[in-house]
Image (cartoon, rainbow, N blue to C red):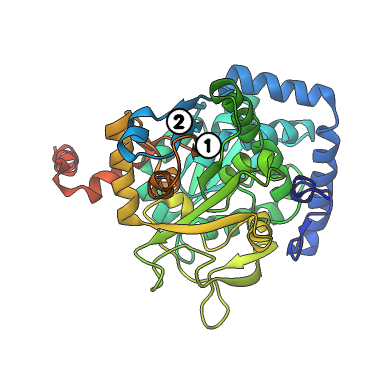
Amino acid sequence: MSLKDTIINKDGHFGDYGGRYVPEILVPIMDDLREAFFEAIEDESFLEELKEVNKTYVGRPTPLYYCENLTKELGGAKIYLKNEGLTHTGAHKINHCIGQGLLAKRMGKKRVIAETGAGQHGLATATVCAKLGLECVVYMGKKDYYRQRPNVFWMEQLGATVIPVEDGGQVLKDAINAAIRDLIANPTDTHYLLGTVCGPHPYPVMNAYFQKVIGEEVRQQMMDQAGKKPDMLAACVGGGSNAMGLYYDFLDDEDVKLIAVEAGGKGVEGNEHAARFEGGEVGIVEGFKSYFLQNEDGQIAGTHSISAGLDYSGVGPQHAYLKEQGRVEFTYAKDDEVIDAYKRLARTEGIFAAMESTHGLVEVIKRAPQLSGDQVIVFNCSGRGDKDLFIVTDVMKDSGFNDYLKTRIHE
């Protein structure tokens, strides 16, 4: 069996990882969702509608951009950027939100719930619900609710109810727990639009399917622009949806190297990071088996990242499998490296990348000079950086923007 067939399969297991570990009340819900999904992707009318909405509403295909200035500055490999930030709502999250939204409507659901960390998944969910006429409730850790306040504002303008979650560390894992509790309480008319390749089956498979359009486009665009496949693909990994979308079409191309970058936070030696393969252990949490950062008592450990979307203690089970198979190389980037890379991309190419995406860029900057000029790296810019305005201005104390905000607040 090819790796592609393993990653998208009806069983929902990826070697020892994945599965479906849910309360009994959720079993029939997950069964119905699995059957509806696999039925839909064999239905030409569903696939045509998905293709049309992606083209006319999402804005696909997204550009594959040659970073000529950055390439010259670094030397070595040519660097290309897959600009998912130019989708409607500004990130790759819209890909699986459109797919799941259409599926929910097909199933007759009236209400959609979601969790979000960076706010991009919540924003995309709220946008899709507005388009499709579905009620929308978004759960967001209270910590993320404040540091991603612009996205909260936009979600509310779209008609969504955004609920700050005060449990636990008040981050993404706590928002997921709150959404699962909601689904248990409202099992009939509600679809849980989970935002990454985590969770119980069929979510990892389903979201990998809806995200694989990224890599499919990259393959065609690379042939059109450079006449060859990329030599290396790089992406950040929180739950892992943008990386899975980039990698999927190339999983069986052994000559294409796959690099995944986790959140190294303030350093992996302590507890202020979210690098699951640096000290994490196998566990079963939130309905699936994978690697999680855990404390001495086996409880989920706290995490830290400058990026809200990577501040998660677990990683998608498909990624755990691909690492174990040696197909994907995992590394990490620290907060200060991310800020430096963010500035560099902005000043060389005029592109503001999301803090999450910029983790992948850190590794590109390190590796490009080590490669030859006829080699190509494609970096997935999974989202644009305007959502990180408050994070960046807080770090860059000399920007003057925080002083401006304080003045406006006190006027």
82 up-or-down from 356: above or below: above
How far apart in space, not on screen, are marks 1 and 2 (Cα)? Answer: 7 Å
Q: Is residue 355 left or right of residue 10?
A: left
Residue 38 appears anywhere in the view: yes
Q: Is residue 118 left or right of residue 398?
A: right
Badge 2 amino acid = Gln
**What residue is at 60 percent from the left and 16 percent from the top?**
56
Query: Residue 393, how many percent across, how many down?
Result: 24, 44
**What residue is at 41 percent from the left and 72 percent from the top?**
271
**What residue is at 33 percent from the left and 45 percent from the top?**
341
Residue marked by disc 1 = 160
Q: Nearer the viewer, residue 189 or 8?
A: 8
Decide: marks 1, 2 in contact (CB < 8 A)?
Answer: no
Query: Residue 196, how many percent across, how many down?
Result: 61, 48
Q: Nearer the viewer, residue 342 or 252?
A: 252
386 up-or-down from 298: above or below: above
Residue marked by disc 2 = 157
User: Image quadrant for the C terminus?
Assistant: top left
291 up-or-down from 14: above or below: below
**What residue is at 13 percent from the left and 40 percent from the top?**
407
Badge 1 amino acid = Ala
